[in-house]
Structure formats: structure tokens, C-alpha cells
């Protein structure tokens, strides 16, 4: 008889995160529109800063002091209210771990970001999934699920993979409807893609209340996904709890140096936002023109569009045809969306190519 350590039952129940692929089934590298990365790449100033970073033989600053100071200055936040993470993923995980455990409930919406399920389960808490409203977040449906066991609520705004967005009033209503001892995590991984007038008020809520954590990332508009840098902000007690359990040297030397330079290069961020808004509008208009062939792009405020295939052409067929044409997008059967492709906004030429493939497949001309 062989014996082996047995993982906790709640760990064995977890479905591992499925990352966006970068190659086709035959291993051929494809142009990647599957991971919501920045098609403009990375700020040249951030790339230059990599060479200046503290040598890799030395541990990084454990508190990312210069980077937190720069973020604090940019967003008008006391740096003491900022915690850094190895990607915002780390912040999501440690937030769940700090506030929820076995017997507790963690709420998120159906078609919410898939890491919320892992974050809830890995600390032994019970995930509670709120029904969506046409693929978007339904604040009332979510609030209806709150019990005395609820400890954490996760909402991404804009949401991945749907692209849906809750305006300021809805975020305020969600917060107002929650008991003060429930932590609400407002995940703003895509916030920099919003037009400035679409501010959802999340940072103001985190500044004013003890139960709001806002998370942000350098992986999307800042073009630093490979460096794994995220951050969170909230009340001092919250930040203290997360600092106790985060990785001690969780942002690398190169990551701290590049992120610092990236924050200073807001011209790059503006360029990326404007590129995204223009290409997304053009892509959505082209998709809507194929609407009578069953294609339905969901409204998106992020750097991707979720396209529903509700006619004769299936998402799977389109996924395969795009791969044959050299493009990998995200098909989402594992997230209960076998009828959908999530397509990252790429360069203009890439969006022309993808549009042409879909036009050919639908016979839209
Ligand atoms: N939140 C959302 C909604 C996301 O889409 C992502 C990236 N897929 C993350 C958080 C995590 O990003 P990172 O760990 O790279 O900061």
C-alpha cells in the first residue's frame, strides 16, 4: 500500500485557472488576442528603466516604497494605504484568505473573473454565485444572496470576460446595501481603459470606508503583464492585514523599476487608451453589421470584446478558423460560455484581419 499526503478536500475541488494560449493545437505560435495584453507593448521609458534596476543578486525593496509613493501621488492616496502584489491576483487571493475561511461565504457574479472562485475555495470558504443580468452584474441579485456568513464580495469593474461595467451609482448602491463587516473587493484591472468621465467612484469609496478594497494592475494598460505587479488600496486596517500575509519580496527589482517609470509615462497610457477606444468602436461596429448572422458583441468598456455566436456559426468553428488564420482568441467553454469568444483589441491591422475572417465565415461579405 502506498500512502501520500492528501490535499484538503476543498483544494481538490478547485478547477485550475486556464490561461490564454499563445499557440494553436499543433503548437504553431499564433498572434495572441487571448490574454488582454497591450498591443502597443510597453512604455519605452519603462523598458529603459529595466536596465537601471537594482541588480538581481540583491533582494528587492520589500515594501516597494518608491513605487507606492509614485502611485500615491498619481492617485491622491496616502502610500500607507497601498499594498503591492505579485500581480493583482496575489491581492485577490490574500484578501479572501485574510477575511474568509471554512464556513464563510464569498459572493461573486456568474461570468465574473475566474480567479474569484479559486480565491474563495483555496481558503476553504464557500463560493456563492449571483445570477447575471444579460451577462452583466445585477446588484440586486447579488445583494439578495448576502447572509450572516458572507465575508467577501468580489466585483470586477469593468468585468472580465464580459466587458460589462457598473456606473458609479450602481457601485455606490452595492456598497450601501452590504453590511459594514463584509469586505467588498472592487477589481479595477481595466479601469485605465475607461474614459475619465466614466469613473466608477471605487477609489473614493476605498478612501472613505473601512470595508472597500480596490485592486489595480500593471498587466493591462501599462503593458507589464510579464513583470507581475498589482496593487490594492483601502483602509489602514485592511492594508495591515494584507501586508501580514503577502509574499515578503513580492515585487521584483525590475518590476519596481519598470512600474515606477511606467507610472511617470502617462503619455503612453493615454495613447493606449485612445488606441483601444478607437479600435474597439470600429470592431464592435463591424460585428454589429454581422448581427443578422447571429453575432452579438456585448458592450465593453475594457480592452476586449465578448462576442456571442447566436446563429448558425458557432464560437468553436470561429475559434478554429481564426487559429487557422494565425490568431488565438479566448474560447470560454470552461467558464460556461461555449457560445462566446473573448477577443482582445489588438493593432488596427490585426483587427482588420479578425474582422475579415468573421465576415468570410458568416458570409457577410
Ligand atoms: N482581475 C481581472 C478582472 C483580470 O482580468 C485579471 C487578469 N486576467 C486580473 C485581475 C489579474 O491580473 P494580474 O494578476 O496580472 O494583475
Image: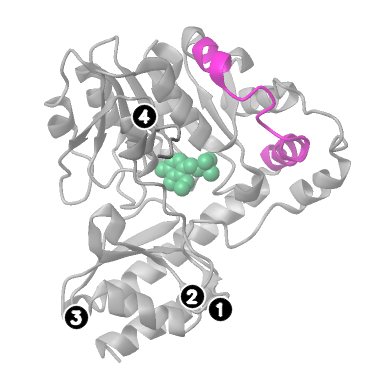
- Is residue 210 rendered to the left or right of residue 164? right
The span shown in magenta is 239-264
Residues at marks 1 and 4 touching, judged by CB atoms closer than 8 Å: no
Mark 2 CB near ligand 1 (8 Å cut): no
Residues at marks 1 and 3 touching, judged by CB atoms closer than 8 Å: no
Answer with mark 1 or mark 3, whichever residue precedes in sequence: 1
| Vertical arrangement, residue 271 with respect to residue 26, above or below | above
Q: Under tag 3, what secondary structure?
A: helix
**Which residue is depicted at the point 46% across and 76% down?**
25
Extreme residue in the front direction: 1
**Which residue is depicted at the point 45% across and 35% down?**
4
Q: Is residue 62 visible?
A: yes
Identify the image quadrant of residue 112. top left
Answer with mark 2 or mark 4, whichever residue precedes in sequence: 4
User: Residue under circle 1?
Assistant: 28
Q: Residues within 10 Å of mark 4 (few under 14, many from 20)?
A: few
The disc label shown at residue 8, or none: 4
Mark 3 CB near ligand 1 (8 Å cut): no
Residues at marks 2 and 1 touching, judged by CB atoms closer than 8 Å: yes
Q: Nearer the viewer, residue 103 or 147?
A: 103
Magenta stretch prevailing secondary structure: helix
The disc label shown at residue 293, or none: 3
**How far, Cα to Cα, is label 1 from label 3?**
30 Å
Q: Under tag 4, what secondary structure?
A: loop
- Judged by depth in the image, the label closer to the viewer, 4 or 3, is 4
- Is residue 154 rendered to the left or right of residue 344? left
The quarter of the image holding the C terminus is: bottom left
Amino acid at each position: 500500500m502506498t500512502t501520500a499526503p492528501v490535499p484538503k478536500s476543498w483544494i481538490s475541488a478547485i478547477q485550475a485557472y486556464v490561461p490564454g494560449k499563445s499557440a494553436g493545437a499543433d503548437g504553431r505560435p499564433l498572434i495572441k488576442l487571448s490574454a488582454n495584453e497591450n498591443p502597443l507593448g510597453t512604455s519605452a521609458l519603462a523598458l529603459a528603466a529595466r536596465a537601471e534596476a537594482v541588480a538581481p543578486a540583491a533582494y528587492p525593496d520589500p515594501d516597494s516604497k518608491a513605487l507606492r509613493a509614485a502611485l500615491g501621488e498619481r492617485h491622491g492616496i496616502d502610500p500607507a494605504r497601498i499594498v503591492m502584489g505579485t500581480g493583482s491576483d496575489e491581492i485577490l487571493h490574500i484578501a479572501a484568505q485574510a477575511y474568509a475561511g471554512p464556513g464563510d461565504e464569498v459572493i461573486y457574479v456568474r461570468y465574473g473573473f475566474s480567479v474569484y472562485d479559486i480565491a474563495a475555495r483555496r481558503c476553504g470558504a464557500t463560493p456563492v454565485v449571483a445570477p447575471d443580468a444579460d451577462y452583466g452584474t445585477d446588484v440586486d441579485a447579488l445583494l439578495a444572496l448576502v447572509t450572516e456568513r458572507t465575508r467577501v464580495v468580489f466585483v470586477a469593474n469593468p468585468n472580465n470576460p464580459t466587458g460589462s461595467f457598473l456606473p458609479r451609482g450602481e457601485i455606490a448602491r452595492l456598497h450601501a446595501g452590504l453590511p459594514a463587516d463584509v469586505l467588498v473587493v472592487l477589481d479595477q484591472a481595466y479601469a485605465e481603459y475607461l474614459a475619465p468621465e466614466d469613473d466608477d467612484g471605487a477609489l473614493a469609496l476605498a478612501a472613505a470606508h473601512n470595508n472597500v478594497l480596490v485592486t489595480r494592475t500593471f498587466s493591462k494598460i501599462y503593458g507589464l503583464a510579464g513583470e507581475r505587479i498589482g496593487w490594492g488600496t483601502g483602509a489602514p486596517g485592511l492594508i495591515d492585514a494584507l501586508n501580514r500575509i503577502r509574499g515578503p519580496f513580492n515585487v521584483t527589482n525590475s518590476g519596481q523599476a519598470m512600474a515606477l517609470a511606467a507610472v511617470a509615462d502617462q503619455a503612453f497610457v493615454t495613447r493606449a487608451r485612445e488606441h483601444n477606444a478607437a479600435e474597439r468602436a470600429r470592431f464592435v461596429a463591424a460585428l454589429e453589421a454581422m448581427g443578422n448572422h447571429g453575432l452579438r458583441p456585448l458592450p465593453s468598456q475594457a480592452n476586449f470584446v465578448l462576442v456571442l455566436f447566436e446563429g448558425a456559426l458557432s464560437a468553436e468553428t470561429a475559434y478554429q478558423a481564426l487559429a487557422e488564420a494565425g490568431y488565438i482568441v479566448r474560447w470560454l467553454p470552461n467558464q460556461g460560455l461555449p457560445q462566446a469568444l473573448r477577443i482582445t483589441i489588438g493593432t488596427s491591422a490585426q483587427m482588420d484581419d479578425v474582422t475579415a475572417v468573421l465576415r468570410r465565415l458568416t458570409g457577410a461579405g
